[in-house]
Amino acid sequence: MVPPRVGAENMARDSALQSRAARTGETVFSVYSWSRPALSFGRNQPARGLYDLKRIREADVDLVRRPTGGRAILHHREVTYSVTAPVDGAGPLRETYSRINRILQLGLSHLGVLVELAATSERARVPSVRPCFEIPGEGELVAGGAKLVGSAQWRENGALLQHGSILVADDQSSLPDFAAAATGARESIPVPATLESLLGRAPAPVEVAAAMFEAVRALEDSDAAELAEDEIRGDVLERVPHFLDEDWTWRR
């Protein structure tokens, strides 16, 4: 498992791995956590005028914008996964989602959690500070009808990046606290599914990672080996300033 890192470095690593996939034709499945709480915006999510930077800073929360889409996520008591792969031979987006979902479903079953695919979702809502985990999108993983895993995929320059969050506990309901203006009561937000609520305990990120890699080896590559971080470290460090740049974070 990748060591916990700050938000900008986690996003820079995913970006570097996406470029590596285009260059080498290899697929990498990663599982990581965050060294401190971080709020992430989706790639094209409007944030200007919707979020209050002063409130975010007062809560001692980092801020970053993801390379992939979707709405805001508070990364704290959760585990993030990412998959980078060449687009050539990967199939259409829906097909790759399904393939990755099979890994996630098997990995979660190793932990003792059974999930299913969400049915068709409601029409996309207007931009707001309501969390990504409020309503499951079509094909996302749910337990008892509540969203447990949120995922998004971005394709660029011959490679794809899909990453998502697996909730260990519920921090997502606090996202309205960072709103620039009142946007509705917190209690109106549906409670998402979490590993803690489903298992009666909060599994450590390393336990989640072990279950996921066991699923990768069972479904995709029995000889899958760990990536040497030194191989991409230089590229990661070169990309960190981009994810620290407020012009990127507040691009919309």
Image (cartoon, rainbow, N blue to C red):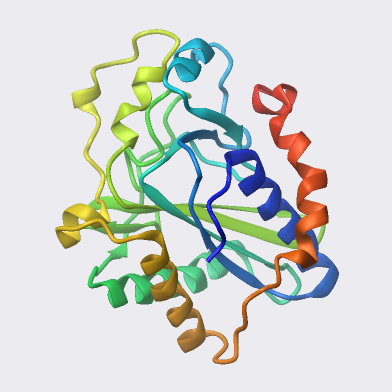
Indicate left or right for 207 with 227 as reference. Answer: left
Q: Residue at x 73, y 75 (%)?
A: 26
Q: Residue at x 68, y 53 (%)?
A: 13
Residue 142 image-quadrant placement:
bottom left
Q: Is residue 137 visible?
A: no
Q: Residue at x 26, y 52 (%)?
A: 194
Q: Residue at x 45, y 37 (%)?
A: 73
Residue furthest top in the image? 181
Q: Quadrant of the C terminus?
A: top right
Indicate left or right for 209 with 159 as reference. Answer: left
Residue 88 point in image, percent of width and height: 76, 72
Q: Is 2 or 176 nearer to us in this picture?
A: 2
Residue 2 point in image, percent of width and height: 57, 61
Q: Is residue 192 above or below residue 142?
A: above
Residue 130 point in image, percent of width and height: 37, 28
Indicate left or right for 65 with 119 as reference. Answer: right
